[in-house]
Image (cartoon, grey):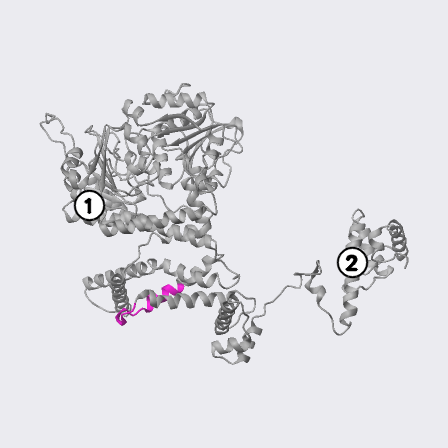
Amino acid sequence: MQDTDLPVLDYQTVTGDFQFAELYDWQQQALRSWKAHNFQGVIEAVTGAGKTRVGIAAIAQALRFGMKVTVLVPTTELQEQWMTSLRKDLPRASIGRLGGSHTADFRSVDVIVAIVNTAGSRSLIEHFRAGLVVADECHRYAAPLFARALDEQYIWRLGLTATYTRHDGRNQVLDEYFGSIVYKIWYDEAQRYGVISEFDIALVGLQLQNHEQVEYDMLSDEISTDTLSLRNYFDQAALSEHDFMEAVGRLSKLEDGSAASAIARRFLRNVAKRQSLLANTPVKNFALAALAPSLAAAERALVFGSSKEQAQAATQALQAVGVPAGHLMSGMTKVDRLGTMNAFRRGELHVLCAPRVLDEGVDVPAADLAIQTSGTRVQRQFIQRLGRVIRKRPSGDRGRFVYLYAFGTIEDPALRDDFLTDVLPFARDYMYFNLEQHLDELIEFLAPEPQPEISVELPLETPAPTEYETSSEQPEFEGQPPRWNDILDDGELPEQLSETVLTDDIIGDYFRKIAQYPLLAHEEMVELAQQVEAGVYAQHLLTTNYTGSRKERRDYWRLVDLGEEAFNRMFTSNLRLVVSVVKRYFWGNGEPSFSFLDVIQEGNLGLQRAVQLWDYTRGFQFSTYAHAWIRQAATRSIAESSRTIRLPVHLVEQLNAIRRIENVWIHEGNEPTTQEIALVLEEEPDKVDAARNAEARILSLSSERWINGVPYLLADLIVDELTLEAEQWSVINSFLRGLRIALQRATAGFKERDQSILFHRWGLTTDDGEMATLEEVGRKYGVSRERIRQIERKLLKELADHEGIKAVWVLER
């Protein structure tokens, strides 16, 4: 499509001053500020303020001027929400999507809602006159993988985010593209405009159990000691907390056996243990049970944790005191997620417990009470969680947020200087509580405000009930029930559970994926193995034409399904075991011809075989049994593919044993003899020599070997014993090599044909130095032998005074 083909669109509700329908005052001011900055900049608005509608107004303005528009989103769920909102507010615009199975382009549409990693692989605006890019959640796009989508050809650029500042120092990437923040609306201004509700914050301190406090103090002391030690390797004081942890992470990955890498690994291990201790302490579940009256009095409540185990434990603690609660986690299927969310929406579940998955963006129904059971050091996470309870609700009641922390730990606000001071001043009220001493005061502080009674005159005839009930929080859809991921009425795009996002670190992506599967205890593995066994037997009965009643067949098919689910759980919960086993054999076997992930895949096949054959009745652990199968699959795959000519597996294992013995002796300062190795292995010395001889690898004849500072090809160093003596061959080979190098330098400015004639005449095109005759060279170039002689004479005159050639060969022959 050419520039002249751009359609002229007429949006009557849009003017040059951004008078888009139903904009708040702050949204109009934000758009005017964006316009004053040459239509470039970032608008930062707290969650719930309605920044999405700002983007839609900007899109309408761009379409009015005939521009093409790209909306960048990080997930498919947000893509769907933008599509729904744009179709509702801009019904006359042609809109398409890019990413997944969609491939829209500007030849057929005016607006493209693109997933950022797909948009980064192509230029959407390349052949068009002008364009606008609206980057939702723009703080994410500083990552190298996503930054490729920030095309310089967009002349209008608008970033939307709730928290713009990053902690990895990459905000400069966004500043250079968008031009920094042009408008910011924080809690005070959002409350003044009436776009969020007021909120109270309760900071509730808990005392760890004695043994937990001892363990915490011990871990903290070790962390402090290691932090001081790490100063010797880089200036920890000059680094931010994020940069320091990244530097320690890189140091811990070194496999050089140094003290620095060992200290870094111990440091990270202790930090993880301390965080796990604070997250999983039973004290916080006791606190949730104590706050059951407040949770029951709330319209809806959310409990935020930091791990799946913590969310499950919180759910169990609340159910034990009679509070209907459920949990939402990334490991659940979409059907289970939807069922849990609908139950929470309908009120069947009064409390929803979740780890960080809610931070990544689930569109939850409006809640008026949230409890955070684990401390966070990231401002973005705290603001997103607080945003769940400050959305405007029909009741007009305030939102209430409870921050649980352990006294005297890194969670304690009294020991921290962080973002809490940026939020607390804008709360309607905030108070510190000691749970053991102030429980009654805390419950009173969290009690909802009484609502005035409203008398309503009922009609004489009650209308027939509709198929689906709707509330003021949900949009009404014709012909279909409201879904838990529908757009909220305030115009803010709800966030969704995001799918796996791939990065340039493939191994890291795989590790993050398998980390979502929880580890299982021995008793759970036995129970699952019994279900697998029952499923296999049921499948046998069904496939052997077992005849029974319809109910019996249904029961058998149910057993088969349960067996398959149990098999998958046993398999996925042990994927981390595969990684821990195969890395010992991968890194210690030279350079295999395939990647680490390929070895992991082979180990996974061994794990699959172990799940099939494990006999739980014999009493030993599954991990012990699976270890052998995983090791066998990994080592055999390495043995079969790491060499051009495969060696038998038993011989490879023998060579590995020999190599281990040699490494031990060399580390002690000695080099073992064949007899000493044979003695340790209890083998004959002849067998050890045979194994060593079999280890010889195939080498390329074109590989280089350095002799006296001069590089030689391996093929040039091989002596033909049938034609030349070794000494004579060495002299001739050295002479030809020197002459070849000198002639290449001397004829660098000659024509290619002239160079080739000299090389053939001087015997530099063959390994034996055989000179080509004038007739042979003439035949090659289609001229007479006399013409070749003339050319050669002319070239020799030009080279007569070249010192490099004189040093190798006197020209007058």
Q: Is residue 563 above or below residue 101?
A: below
Direction from residue 362 to residue 400 in the image, left or right: left
Q: Position of residue 797 (x, y in %)?
A: 89, 50
Q: Position of residue 656 (x, y in %)?
A: 49, 69
Helix, strand or loop at label 2? It is helix
- Residue 285 seen by the camera: yes
- The segment highlighted magenta reads 605-620
Direction from residue 359 to residue 554 in the image, left or right: left
Q: Is residue 721 above or below residue 405?
A: below
- Residue 330 seen by the camera: no
Spatial CA distance of label 1 from label 2 is 84 Å
Helix, strand or loop at label 1? It is strand
Q: Mainly helix, strand or loop, the magenta region?
A: helix
Which class describes the residues within 10 Å of circle 2: few (<14), some (14-19), or many (20+)? some
Residue 617 among magenta residues: yes
| Quarter that holds the C terminus | bottom right
Residue 351's image quarter? top left
Residue ID at (84%, 51%):
803
Q: Position of residue 422 (x, y in %)?
A: 32, 30
Q: Amino acid at mark 1?
A: Ala
- Residue under label 1, please give it: 325
From the viewer's side, name the closer residue of 28 and 7: 28
Residue 12 among magenta residues: no
Q: Amino acid at mark 2?
A: Gly
Q: Is residue 70 above or below residue 640?
A: above
From the viewer's side, name the closer residue of 620 and 105: 620
Which class describes the residues within 10 Å of circle 1: few (<14), some (14-19), or many (20+)? many
Q: Is residue 186 above or below residue 766?
A: above
- Residue under label 2, please give it: 738
Direction from residue 362 to residue 254 in the image, left or right: right
